[in-house]
Amino acid sequence: MKRTLSCVGVCLLAVLMCSPCAWGKTIKIGFNIPLTGDIPKVGEESKFAAEMLREDINGAGGLEIGGEKYTLEFIYEDNESKAESAVSAALKLIERDQVLAIVGPNSSKQAVPGGQVCDDNRTPMISPWSTNPDTTKDRPWVFRAAFLDPFQGPVAVDFAMKKFNAKKSAVLFALANDYSKGLAEIFKADFEKKNGTGSVVAFESYGDKDQDFSAQLTKIVAAKPDFIFLPNNYNEVALIVKQAHDLGWKGPFMGADAWGNSELMTLCGDDCIGHYFSTHYAAAGATGATQEFIERYQKKYGYEPADVAALTWDATRIVLKGLQGMGKVTGKVRKDRKNLREAIAGIAEVDGITGKMKFDEQGDPIKCAVVVRISEKGEFVFTESVCP
């Protein structure tokens, strides 16, 4: 009797393993994000936003594609905020986990090399937060949900010229960070185009893992700029602003989208109040679907979501829209990846919670930026919107 039951069990297991219902109803999407390293809060916010969306879809019975419902499986791989780890994370997701698409990396330092891996391996990738043009340039398998630095740099220049009546500027950037270095160079070129050669009176850099910026800031303060531009990650901004104040700097700072993290004010405190940065959306005063997302996220996780959370939501929804546009899932990973890439490339417009976006031939969205002011309450308050 036991032998008979055992045989029945083996047969049932074999049927389940071979049945499309056992494996064909799940779709795997990978997330290449920094859960540890220099910017772990970025990875946390991406994961939290993705989980909220996954729970919504699966709670409603799954994602419908061609009349069939599919359960979403999200696989999170830690890239440790390192370029080399982003490469290995992408390869694991592609080869080991057989995902259909990858969301992330976020920071351009990881997204540029990660994008090369995905393009080489013909796997759709969409970066929520990377603004460096090289992430998607000549890579038909790579997309993004963020605006680009060639747009963001002039936004910062024009705002500073108008708000601070700036004729001279200084820049401090991270030499080993593709995002920081690229945006610094774009800013310098645009500022000098509008204010004359030499109007960027100090253009200073620092190395990976540096914590003391006093030498560079001493040169900057001595050059007497009208403001200091900091295209840096939020954790470094907190150190730089405090050290600049210790050296006697009393002027304004202008930052970029990597300032926009929920931990900035925890790290920076009163030193960051009153300064401005360009970003993807303003949480304070948001309305409609954006407000709903913020309130749900805050209730679920206990803090207000930064732009990277909202952008991850939008980026993941673009992948899901692409999946639905495929019409059907064949179960053959390479074929489904190809069909998904073509479906994403065919999306003309998305109405995201970070704004409406249209996509160009490089897979880059054409969308507006916002400039926010850090209020006395530590909130990122909308100041103005700038559109292409």
Image (tube, rainbow, N blue to C red):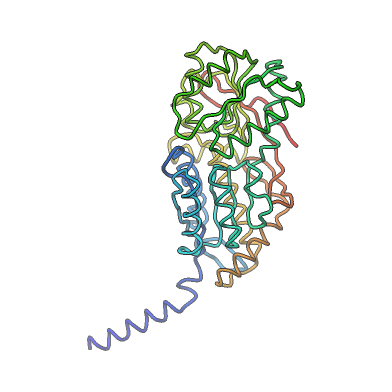
Which residue lies at the image location 44% right of the left edge and 33% below the top edge?
209
Question: Can the viewer see residue 189 in this picture?
Answer: yes
On screen, residue 254 versus residue 29, left or right, reads: right
Compared across the picture, whether 209 is left or right of 359 comes to left
Residue 172 coordinates in the image, percent (x, y): 57, 26
Q: Position of residue 265 (x, y in %)?
A: 47, 25
List x then y, in percent, for residue 233.
Answer: 52, 33
Q: Quadrant of the N terminus?
A: bottom left
Report the number of numbered marks: 0
Tell me if residue 201 comes above or below residue 320 in the rendering. Answer: above
Q: Determine if residue 381 is in view.
A: no
Quadrant, the C terminus: top right
Q: Vertical placement of 81 versus 181: above or below?
A: below
- Which residue sits at x=49%, y=23%? 213
Q: Is residue 247 above or below residue 294?
A: above
Left or right: 106 with respect to 159?
Answer: left
User: From this viewpoint, which residue is outermost toward the left?
Assistant: 2
Which residue shows up at 42% across the image and 77% down it?
A: 17
Q: Residue at x 45, y 38 (%)?
A: 41
Nearer to me, 81 or 331? 81
In depth, the one of 64 and 178 nearer the eye is 178
Q: Nearer the viewer, residue 335 or 354?
A: 335
Residue 275: x and y in percent read: 58, 20
Residue 236 versus residue 42 in the image, above or below: above
